[in-house]
Image (cartoon, grey):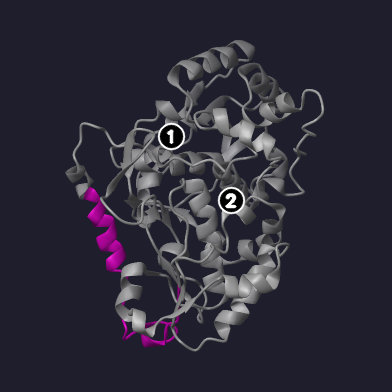
Amino acid sequence: MPMWALCALGSIDLGRSAGSLHALPGYRERERLLPQHNLSLPYPEGGHAKFLWVANHGSGFGWGNYMQEMVLNAYLAYAARRAYVFDNYTWAREGPEISSFNGKLIPARIPLSALITGPIIGGSTGNKDVPRAVSREYFFSVCPESKRVVLDTRKIQNTLGEEATVSQIVERWVEELNSIQSPCVELARDSPALFSYAITNTKPVLDVYPALSQSPILSDFGWSPLVLEGFYNNSKYFTDFAEPESPIETHTTPLNGLLVLHIRRGDYESWCNDAYKDGMSFTGFNSFPALPNRYTPPNRHAAGSAAIARQHCLPSIPEILQKVLTVTEPHITRIYVMTNASPSWLADLKRALGAAHHWPNGIATSRDLELSWEGKFVSGAIDMHVGQRADIFIGNGFSSLTSNIVMLRMHNPELKPSDIHFW
């Protein structure tokens, strides 16, 4: 699996100092002041609350993988009627606030409230028996190490077997958590993650979707004001109608006339060959039976198999054009390209798209967005919000970022599964 670069969310200007992260404590302070951080509150919060701290959550990879694991961890806590203990979006757990990737400076930790809103980050659970999520800092204050029940995940996972689905994992862990009276439960940091990409990249994740989609974890999931501000400030690339000036809530209204393409380059230029050699298929949520495009890894011994795999993972400009012209409809008037490709390659793509078809409202890419300094660090989430609402979406079936967009689109009754495509 590739290292989903945090720099996809934005890299730090090398000319800036570490002190330029001065704005980030504002997010952490707001997290610190959540009203549920109060022991005097009535049931199910205050002194009655039970918590689940997933100390073994992933780090060192990008937002797509992190978000998939986070959503499932939060759903497990909800199903067990425990407060989910949220953490930063984490590249490096310890050390300076600034890390590096591929020679670029990146934030080592981004406050989760800079990315999302909703129950995962402390919003209402909508359930009188489920406490709201709390910060790691609050959990540490009310649950010192001496009071915590620390569980090695292998204790339960080894009883399930390698073929267990996500629903089966959740059901078994809810049973285990409900048997524990202690309010302070931690999944040991040095034990395997329950929902790593080893399972979120496979079809066994799909069976949890009906229950997940009915829970507030997904139904009340939203993007942060910082993400929405970036969207609104660049709405000319996505839509003709005016959006609210104040980014206070996530809108899921389809962006009529917009075709969004998710095109990976960068690390995929080498990683796609590894995916071919490993016989990888599309990730879990990119494998919904209702979706029109399927992919079966080709037999590596068959002639042309490498080329077949490559066109699904790393399509060339002619292959992109062919797919776009196949799925576009008369009412599509603009294209937005979510991408980490180089400016020169994107210039060639824009010329080819423009020559092949008339797009009255133009073609834009991730590199065209005008973002604040803070906004650059959540640009990947801004792209996800656009893809989530696109009239038609063509994604990369191997990508967890695409997979999250598909998960959110499948939850939206105003959008059709038939308008989700893959290269």
Identify the residue position indicated by label 2 in the image.
Answer: 408
Q: What residue type is disc 1 on? A: Ser
Is 169 or 324 nearer to us in this picture? 169
Relative horizontal placement of residue 85, taking residue 162 as reference (left or right)? left
Q: Which residue is mark 1?
A: 235
Residue 278 spot, x, y in % from top left: 68, 40
For the C terminus, give its image quadrant.
top right
Measured from the top left, where is residue 353 in percent x and y?
A: 59, 16
Residue 28 visible in the displayed image: yes
Classed neighbour count for the residue bearing mark 1: other residues with Cα under 10 Å, few (<14), some (14–19), many (≥20): some
- Which label's residue is closer to the chain start, 1 or 2? 1
Q: CA distance from mark 1 to mark 2?
A: 20 Å
The magenta stretch spans residue 358: no
Q: Within the image, what quadrant is residue 170 found in?
A: bottom right
The residue at the far right in this view is 302
Side of 416 where 32 appears, left or right: left
Place of residue 89 in the rendered image (x, y in percent of width and height, measured from the top left): 40, 54
420 lies left or right of 141: right
Is 420 above or below relative to 221? above
Q: Position of residue 36 (x, y in %)?
A: 35, 75
Q: Residue at x 39, y 43 (%)?
A: 378
Q: Which quadrant does the N terminus fall into?
A: top right
The extreme top residue here reads: 355
The magenta region covers: 23-52
Mark 1 or 2, closer to the camera:
2
| 199 vs 81: above or below | above
Q: Marks 2 and 1: in contact by CB < 8 Å?
A: no
